[in-house]
């Protein structure tokens, strides 16, 4: 059991309000990702939950107990950071068991816990090595192992993979997802600005902007029903196409958005006509960029197996029911057109 309840939470540094009235409930055993642009308050929210930062206003409860004034060490929380500062002179096993040694846990118990964590993280062959003899991904796994041995109720990750190369990030993503399955009772909060990481690992995603929660939901809910234009453009790759002015007015909106996969080329006159200015073939799919005289070209996803259109003048139509409509404040209007 380890559910987290945050009510009306505010955090200011001096005169700067960094978190503004955040309400959030996280269920026991849930894996939640915090995403948002740099400086939106992701790390601050995580640090407030961990107790590394104080709360300016509002409340934080873990398992129904108010945590506002409980010190970090008494919250049952472990944190893994982007930089993982392992002790260079200690072996992997010593690094992983260090917090248990400090806590004066008996040697046999320490060894058992380190072994179990090493097994979970596929670190058994490296237990006697020093950190400098490990790859980046292996070091990051040791940092995670160091947190696991403490058997935390809540696991907090702050961009743990951002120092790793793309291939290693993908592998670690799978490892962390597997870890989630092996520790079903542990609540996990994962900060990232990589929306793909959030989409693939999280049960629910919290999108933050300027210290405010924009939307909380399952990845596919955010993808298909973004509550704001900001969420619509933040989630999904390539980014959703956005049109204003007359294009939007025709749909009774201030702004409309259509994902690249919800646009089709049309042989008759389409909603939008323009010039294909560039294409990218990625194998499974291709992206065609069509200049329709607006600020940004439309991105149209096409089947990668098919040939790209021969002519450069093309007509584009949206798939029925897949046009997202937004009002002047950027809020989603109830029905898609
Ligand atoms: N100790 C501090 N004192 C003053 N301002 C701070 C402090 N820590 C963070 N801030 C400010 O709070 C805001 C949010 O910072 P935070 O580190 O939470 O952002 P973030 O979403 O994690 O960004 P990033 O993706 O770049 O890590 C920033 O404007 C930052 O400058
Ligand atoms: Mg941060």
Image: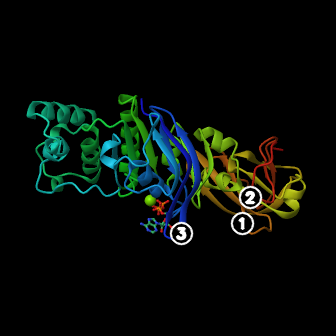
In contact (CB < 8 Å): disc 1 and disc 2 = yes
- The answer to which quarter of the image holds residue 87 is bottom left
The residue at label 2 has a CB less than 8 Å from ligand 1? no
Write down the residue under mark 3: 16
Q: Is 86 placed above or below 60 here?
A: below
**Could you tell whether 174 is left or right of 270 in the image?**
left
**Could you tell whether 153 is left or right of 31 in the image?**
left
Write down the residue under mark 1: 296
Q: Secondary structure at mark 2?
A: strand
Q: Nearer the viewer, mark 3 or mark 1?
A: 3
Which residue is found at the position 30% from the left and 46% from the top? 73
Q: Position of residue 157 (x, y in %)?
A: 39, 48
The residue at label 3 has a CB less than 8 Å from ligand 1? yes
Q: Nearer the viewer, mark 1 or mark 2?
A: 2
Q: Position of residue 166 (x, y in %)?
A: 40, 53
Residues packed near mark 2 inside 10 Å, few (<14), some (14 to 19) or many (20 plus):
many
Q: Is 41 placed above or below 285 here?
A: below
Q: CA distance from mark 3 to mark 1?
A: 34 Å
């Amino acid at each position: 059991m380890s559910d987290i309840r945050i009510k009306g939470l505010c955090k200011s540094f001096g005169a700067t309000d960094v978190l503004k009235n955040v309400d959030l409930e996280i269920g026991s055993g849930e894996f939640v990702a915090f995403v948002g642009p740099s400086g939106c308050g992701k790390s601050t929210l995580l640090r407030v939950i961990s107790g590394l930062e104080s709360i300016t206003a509002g409340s934080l409860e873990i398992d129904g107990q108010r945590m506002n004034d409980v010190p970090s060490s008494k919250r049952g929380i472990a944190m893994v950071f982007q930089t993982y500062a392992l002790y260079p002179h200690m072996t992997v096993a010593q690094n992983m068991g260090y917090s248990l040694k400090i806590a004066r846990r008996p040697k046999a118990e320490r060894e058992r816990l380190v072994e179990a964590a090493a097994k979970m993280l596929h670190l058994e062959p490296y237990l006697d090595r020093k950190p400098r003899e490990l790859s980046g991904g292996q070091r990051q796994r040791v940092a995670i192992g160091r947190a696991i041995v403490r058997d935390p109720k809540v696991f907090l990750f702050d961009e743990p993979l951002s120092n790793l190369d793309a291939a290693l990030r993908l592998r670690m993503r799978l490892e962390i997802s597997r870890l989630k399955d092996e520790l079903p009772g542990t609540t996990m909060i994962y900060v990232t600005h990589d929306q793909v990481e959030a989409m693939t690992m999280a049960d629910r995603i919290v999108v933050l902007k300027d210290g405010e929660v924009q939307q909380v939901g399952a990845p596919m809910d955010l993808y298909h029903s973004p509550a704001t234009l900001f969420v619509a453009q933040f989630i999904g790759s390539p980014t959703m196409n956005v049109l204003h002015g007359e294009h939007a007015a025709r749909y009774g909106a201030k702004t409309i958005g259509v994902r690249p996969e919800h646009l089709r080329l049309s042989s008759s006159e389409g909603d939008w006509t323009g010039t294909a200015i560039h294409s990218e073939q990625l194998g499974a799919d291709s992206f065609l960029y069509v200049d329709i005289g607006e600020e940004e070209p439309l991105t149209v996803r096409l089947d990668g197996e098919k040939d790209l259109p021969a002519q450069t003048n093309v007509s584009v139509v949206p798939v029925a029911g897949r046009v997202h409509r937004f009002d002047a404040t950027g809020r989603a209007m109830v029905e898609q057109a």
